[in-house]
Amino acid sequence: MAGVLVVLPLWAGPAPAATSSRTSPTSRPVTAARSRSTSPPARASDTRPRGAATDRDTTGSAAASVGSGGAQSIDGFGASGAWWPTDVSHFSTAAQRKLAALLFSRTGLELSQYRYNIGGGGVGVKDRYKAPPTVLTASGAYDWGADPAGLAFLKLAAQYHVPQLIGFVNSAPPAFTTNHQSCGGRLDPSKIGAFAVYLAAVVDHLRAAEHIDLSYVSPMNEPDASQAACYQEGMVVPVDERAPLVNALAADLDAGSAHVGVIADESSLVSQLLHEAPAWLAQARKSVAVVAHHGYDYPGAATLAQVTKLPVKHWTTEICCFNGRGFGWQYDPTMVNGLWLADTIWADLVEARDSAFDWWVAASPNLGCDPMQVAGCQNQVNPGGRNDGLVYFDPYWNLDSNQTFYLTKRYWVMAAFSRFVRPGSVLHPVTGLPDGLRGVAFEAHTGWVVEIINGNPDRAYALHLHLPYQAGQAPHAYLTDATHDLAATAVRGTSLDPWMRSPEQSLTTLVYGPTASRVQRTKTRTAQAGPSSRSRNRAST
């Protein structure tokens, strides 16, 4: 528009058309002027019938049952350490530890998986925020200190005893790509063996020098996308090269001193995985530990049901950025997007029978507003940010020294699963729920966890829940909705016949057994919590 100057934050460029993956053609200038908007943008619309909770309390009654037959065992819930450590590494030590507590502590998300981005060097990448260093130098030597930011948060994850630490790449270093860049090319087929040796060397170094054991390595990410615009790292790995890469990496990892599994192929879309997996999976069946997919087609039940037919354990390893219509620009910290995440986790675990669910980036600067100039804007929907993070920080931190972290409802929804549903829990179906409610249960040696999602815009329920056998006590219940964040809520009735209220637009977490103590600490202590001085992986600070 003529005569209008649009000033974008330093991490954002012009809003692109929606795409099917997390690809976002943004530029990030070194410096930029502040946005001087005096009020937050109007709330973006959502195609689903979800909004703020109403004052009208229309309560129904329902009885639901947890099935006695278990399905898959849950491996974990996680998020990635891509990109954001570059910025947060410049924060104070106290701020970095506060973020680590929000992600890894028992009063935070208590993530059971953390995806460490093994950088490709960022050669050719225009957005320096999305250009993580590589430890492989141009001469072929290793510079193990090249990525102190990424390594720092991997160490913190290890100190917090995160059970599964996963290394993943967006691109191989330039020595292994056809265009000798970290974007816009493909993996050189003649360098597959050398690339596998390099990844195994990274794993071995982390174990030997940092005392950090990776559980899995993923050698490709969205292998259909080269990221030709070069706003982030990426490389194509053609379908016929995926099995050779998986097999080579598995062989090199097996030659090491500890077992590390291979994850593949992290396709952008579930539909794409289903189409392409038959062409490579049979040849790599003995080498691949987990088949991984992203969810940027936001698939429905029919597509997810086909995932259950895969002959290998499978995970969702990346999803984000839903704006009510599909992948695109929007920042929504409210329960509208929180309920979308709850529904997405439910669908991936129940309909696809995935064994793990990983969000995209754990932290993001993509608020779409300046919280130091527009008070409270971090709590409002705007069309200029991204629904890509669980925790957010000020995009202008280098100008105003604001090192505050902002939590979204997605954060609290994720916490309801990641904090209570621990690795090894077995999924059980929940039946008998009325329209608008979804449920899923998890059994562990410590007791039961049941998640009840009420997506109705104006109808609450008095819900009786029957377990396959008596838990021996009434559950503790925790409510996440527009005004509550895993807040303790009343359970009525008796230990033999408890019932609770499921409010409209809410997620209620029912915890039977010792696991309930995980929520007793206050949010103030969450911010103050530090890692254990003793790490399972013996990582040092």
Image (tube, rainbow, N blue to C red):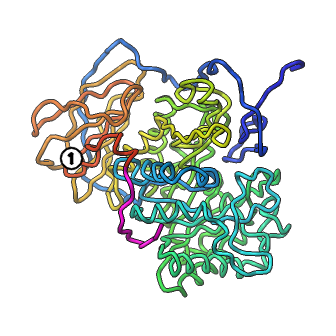
Which residue is disc 1 drawn over?
512
Residue 470, relative to residue 457: is it above or below?
A: below
Q: Nearer the viewer, residue 13 or 57?
A: 13
Mark 1 secondary-structure assignment: strand
Q: Which stretch appears magenta?
A: 529-541
The outermost residue toward the right is 2
Using the rendered image of the protein, determine whether residue 271 is visible from the camera's viewpoint.
no
Please tell me how crowded label 1 is: few (under 14), some (14-19), or many (20+) other residues with Cα within 10 Å.
Answer: many
Number of callouts: 1
Using the rendered image of the protein, determine whether residue 457 is visible from the camera's viewpoint.
yes
Residue 227, relative to residue 385: is it above or below?
A: below
The verdict on residue 180 being magenta is no
Amino acid type at image mark 1: Tyr
Q: Nearer the viewer, residue 271 or 188?
A: 188
Residue 522, relative to residue 3: is it above or below?
A: below
Magenta stretch prevailing secondary structure: loop
**Left or right: 149 in relation to 459:** right
The outermost residue toward the top is 56
**Left or right: 376 in relation to 279:** left
The verdict on residue 531 being magenta is yes
Q: Quadrant of residue 27?
A: top right
Q: Position of residue 323 (x, y in %)?
A: 61, 33
Q: Residue at x 42, y 54 (%)?
A: 104
Q: Position of residue 197 (x, y in %)?
A: 66, 82
Q: Residue at x 51, y 66 (%)?
A: 290
Q: Residue at x 35, y 12 (%)?
A: 56
Q: Quadrant of residue 118?
A: bottom right
Q: Residue at x 27, y 21 (%)?
A: 60
